[in-house]
Image (cartoon, coloured by chain):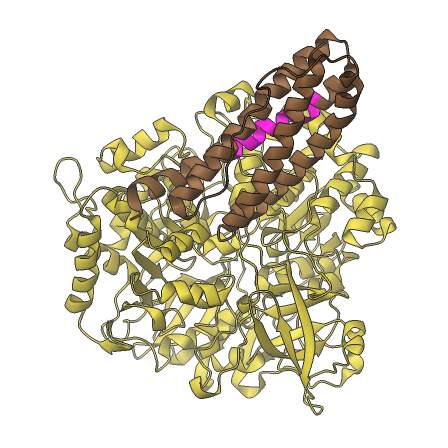
Amino acid sequence: MHLAHYLGLLHRAQVNLADAFRQVADAHAEEPDIRHLCQRQAKLCDAYAEQLQPFAARYAEDAPDEPDRLHSQLFSGTRTGGIGLLRDLQDLYLMAAECDIAWTVVGQAAYGVRDEDLLAVVRRCEGQTALQLKWLRTRMKAAAPQALVVAD
Amino acid sequence: MVDRIADPWGERTPYGPGQEWPVRVDRYLADGRGDADVDRWVQSASVLHSNGDAMDIGVADGRIVGVRGRAVDRINRGRLDPKDLYGWQANHSPDRLTRPLVRDGDRLVETDWDTAMGRVVARSRELLDGPGGWGHFGFYTSGQLFLEEYYTLGLIGKAGLGTPHMDGNTRLCTATAAAAMKASFGTDGQPGSYTDVDHCDAIALWGHNVAETQTVLWMRMLDRRRGPNPPAMLAVDPRATPVAREADLHLAVRNGTNMALVNGLLREIVRRGWYDRDYVDAHTLGFDELCRVIDGYPPRRVAEICDVPAADVERAAELLGSSQRLLSTVLQGFYQSNQATAAACGVNNLHLIRGMIGRPGAGIYQMNGQPTAQNTRETGADGDLPGLRNWDNTKHIEELARLWNVDVDMIPHWAPPTHAMQIFRYAEQGSIKLLWITATNPAVSLPDLARIRRMLARPDLFVVVQDLFRTETAELADVVLPAATWAEKTGTFTSVDRTVHISDKAVDPPGEARTDLDIFLDYARRMDFRDRDGQPLIPWTGPEEAFEAWKECSRGRPCDYTGITYERLRGGGSGIQWPCTEEHPDGTERLYTDGTFNTDPDYCETYGNDLATGAEFTESEYRAKEPRGRAFLLTVDYQPSPEVPDDDRPMLLTTGRTVYQFHTRTKTGRAPQLNQAAPDVWVELNPDDAARLDIAEGDLVAVSSARGAIQARARLCGIRPGVVFVPFHYGYFDQDPGDRTPRAANELTITAWDPVSKQPLFKVAAVAVAKLADGRGVPAPAPTVGGSAPPADAHVPPTVGGPAAEATSGKE
């Protein structure tokens, strides 16, 4: 059963996203909403990762070797300035999207193994991940014209 | 004779439930004049607070000589706030700007209008040339202009230049009111009416020191409290304000925890069965989700988070839950605090689940701070679109394009209009290169002033300031345009409860000062803004024509003005509540009387936001909710403020107001009676904190945050332990530059804002407090009236106005 691998993938994606949110919060501290909201999102991601932990442990016993190229590297540090902010938010968006689809996949697997506890965790967290995506899209939509058309 | 400095609220005229509020006409004429010395009375209303009190301006020999309340008016029944009785004298201040100023190196020098406007237009044309030129313009306007001026300015920005970067200082005072009403009810627009005070059996004041911010509304509440069958009263405020002292129950919550309180109160009300299941089923959406969240807030947890007794939370729920006609008012204690929009929606939830909306006595005032903030919102001179339209609804944008005869995509509608703090951020980053500030003073009123001054002083930012005086902001301008003010121009404006008043020109403006409308029209003419057919974009030339144009813009929208004319506003009566149409020619006292809300997808002002992040929902997501005229019950979990006390800065700062001053004192600081009552900044401390810090009444104290530090004299009074209060009114214009000490509260405040309303957080900064010098027994310059009242045994001389403040008050 390969569920443990996808739980591992999702867990690491949440940990990476938390870390990236923190880095973006620090790099763009001059944008107060970015700073405060990214810090908050980082804490949420920490909490999701923590909730996945027991399930990862539970299913690890049945897992064969980890498949090739399971994890992806979506973030390599922050940038500066208006367009830099936009690019950083885009990185966060892609990372949150990875989490989002992984929640869906894990949720499907949870149905397959009839694991009500895991399903409950998926239900609690996937909606919040969708909101993170929404917030990032909202913020990027507002920032894009000024960053791409107006700024020197 | 009454001294309305010593007693801002005057004599009581008690009345009972369902009775008409008795008339009491307040009047102040300067220099011992009587009625016989007045040549004529000119109809107007107040622009020194948001209550919308109607008054007449007394004129003799072409000058204002005094004011009196309008007995016929539905809002004040003749009463006036002390700021209105005395504040008009600022019009005559010898330092009024009478000629335009332009920058010459480090000085501002007088010039003529052609030169000043020439500079503004030359810079504008230069910036507008090329793709993205619109994005170099930012406008930061006010809550003190008239409707006609805002609408004209909105049109210049949205269809002349095509920029979304326009906001008002209303962002600081009332953005959350608008955001909460949009979120809960579908559009902006106050459900209630001031007459709800006449009918209610309970009043809940949520972070609203109405006694000092809207004194006439407080008089109405006090008159009910002194009459038969008085309403119960609940106050939520960290300070011992006059409201808190009057209330039957005062919850002195820890700053920044309102969300936990409202969730906890809602939980109690649901669990005790004090909600209206039929109303909930028929008229709301989201009850189950609401219950899921509020269930996590039992009284003991609320008590822990808010630091109030659990029993008081239960008592408050009982007071709210047992009332039959509940009136709520909400203001800065919620709007300028942590989780502002969500907490304000919590008050809406309370009224929705109890069915306390749309009938006499059952009302909500999501209050305004600025006098004409309502119109900034309605006309789209702030972060809203004209006529409370939805920026994300293409049909709404098409309506505006048709009305203005411009291409749809001329109007910026790719995102909501840019909010104030973001406009200043773009200016700081250099992408906004022209910032036009009208009738407001961000160099004193915005958070983290050191940063704001740095931004405004940037050499690549061209700053235009339109004002009456050389404010702290004007000192940093490239061009200063002298404006006419209230009583020197004609226009209309609208109160919190949707009452539209006219304010007629009574006297000429000083020198070459021009009305804000004339300045905007002059700019539009010089810029040669045209519509799609090559005709002038703005065809009107005066206020009444602008009002008629606005009426068309408002047609069919919640704020429908089509039944109102200047003639009707002048004729004998006094004030009409919108919507006012052919079908409802006398206006509309209450909204949502049938429980049908403005949530229809084609009509609503927003498709909604996530309250925790501000994330926008799409049209299809909104439609999928099938609102069908039902209101939304929205809440979130409590989250601590972005800044909380720590070892270095162990106390919480909250900023606020005194009854005697308005905003940054541009006018009230120039009215002698008002200014003498509250001449300088002070800091309020709880006596226990003061004892620990070895601070006595009148001692000079340093208050410092991560942003800066100020000095102020200490007033020991009834504020909750661990919290300090500093009034935000005091800047630097009347300090000797050689002897200047930092004293503006906003040197300390944090740059942070609510994710939905984008209203800055002025109520939650972490600060350290230390004694600097002994006061040697001289008390702080704080009034003894209002929230800064010292304990009775403190022997501080009372605040009085003396003979110069003698006014009259009585039945006409």
Q: Residue at x 61, y 67 (%)?
A: B705
Q: Foreground residue, B729 or B460? A: B460
Q: Which portion, as a residue range, is magenta?
A: A122-135
Residue A51 placement, left or right of B343: right
Residue B614 in magenta stretch: no
Q: What hue represents chain A? A: brown
What is the quadrant of residue B379 in the picture? Answer: top left
- Up-down: is B626 above or below B519? above
Residue B197 in the image: x percent, y percent?
Answer: 64, 51
Farthest left residue?
B534
Residue B189 in the image: x percent, y percent?
Answer: 50, 41
- Up-down: is B770 above or below B578? below
Q: Residue at x 66, y 43 (%)?
A: B347
Q: What hue represents chain B? A: yellow
Residue A132 in magenta stretch: yes
Residue B163 placement, left or right of B660: left
Residue B669 placement, left or right of B166: right
- Up-down: is B441 above or below B422? below
Farthest top residue?
A112
What is the quadrant of residue B667 in the picture? Answer: bottom left
Residue A122 in the image: x percent, y percent?
Answer: 69, 21
Residue B488 in the image: x percent, y percent?
Answer: 32, 67
Q: Residue at x 37, y 38 (%)?
A: A144
**Residue B694 appears in the picture as rendered:** yes
- Up-down: is B587 above or below B275? below
Q: Give the quadrant of the N terminus of chain B.
A: bottom right
